[in-house]
Amino acid sequence: EAQVTQNPRYLITVTGKKLTVTCSQNMNHEYMSWYRQDPGLGLRQIYYSMNVEVTDKGDVPEGYKVSRKEKRNFPLILESPSPNQTSLYFCASSKGQGFIQYFGAGTRLSVL
Amino acid sequence: AQRVTQPEKLLSVFKGAPVELKCNYSYSGSPELFWYVQYSRQRLQLLLRHISRESIKGFTADLNKGETSFHLKKPFAQEEDSAMYYCALIGNNNDMRFGAGTRLTVKP
């Protein structure tokens, strides 16, 4: 089944404790992206990747890192999480720019 | 700057009534526009895109370049249409920008 898989689905952590949210897709998509969803602000793009080893900043990259060492994986790294990063995070993938994006189920992160 | 505006955070209609979810954009070029939907406890999924000009679940959206709008319409709303709807635009830098979303509630 074609899908985008995020892990974990729920995470509670404390300020400053490094964490990684994984994202994997099995559709051989070149384009992958991370968003955060906040009430009243909709979805905002954090980082995106056009292909392996090619990543770029979205609208709200501060406090986040990503890597794209393999086509199927696009982990989101929070080196030193802060409470303002408490949010619902979505990973998405597509064949490329302008193509339909497929979303993961979301990761709800709480930073205390 | 590319921007997507959904002026209504909440929209409530009765079953069988027409519904229109507004989306306005600012973009210097030929836009690629989409509507995504998020049903309760489900992931976001594409509803429709302006290029395909198709009707999905009875919804249509027409790109109006003069008014820079891409409103989503359905003539007869159903209770199962209750969801969060996001308008989105593909920007110059290959990034996708979403509006703030409109929560549609269809009452019986």
Image: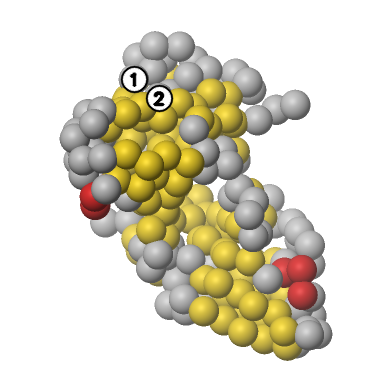
Identity, as a three-letter code, of the amino acid under mark 1 = Ser
The residue that disc 2 covers is A75
Image vertical order of residue A46 relative to residue A8, above or below: below
Crowding near pointer 1: few (<14 within 10 Å), some, many (20+)?
A: some
Q: Give the percent coordinates (x, y) of residue A97.
A: 48, 35
Under circle 2, the secondary element is: loop
Under circle 1, the secondary element is: loop
Q: Give the percent coordinates (x, y) of residue A108.
A: 45, 46
Residue at point 60%, 18% (across, down): A28
Q: Residue furthest top?
A: A69
Q: Give the percent coordinates (x, y) of residue B42.
A: 64, 51
The residue that disc 1 covers is A67
Image vertical order of residue A25 relative to residue A104, above or below: above
Q: Is residue A6 left or right of residue B97?
A: right
Residue at point 36%, 27% (across, down): A20
Q: Is residue A59 left or right of residue B102?
A: left
Q: How is the image coloured?
A: secondary structure
- A29 or A3: nearer the eye? A3
Where on the picture, by quarter, is residue B67?
A: bottom left
Residue at point 52%, 43% (across, down): A106
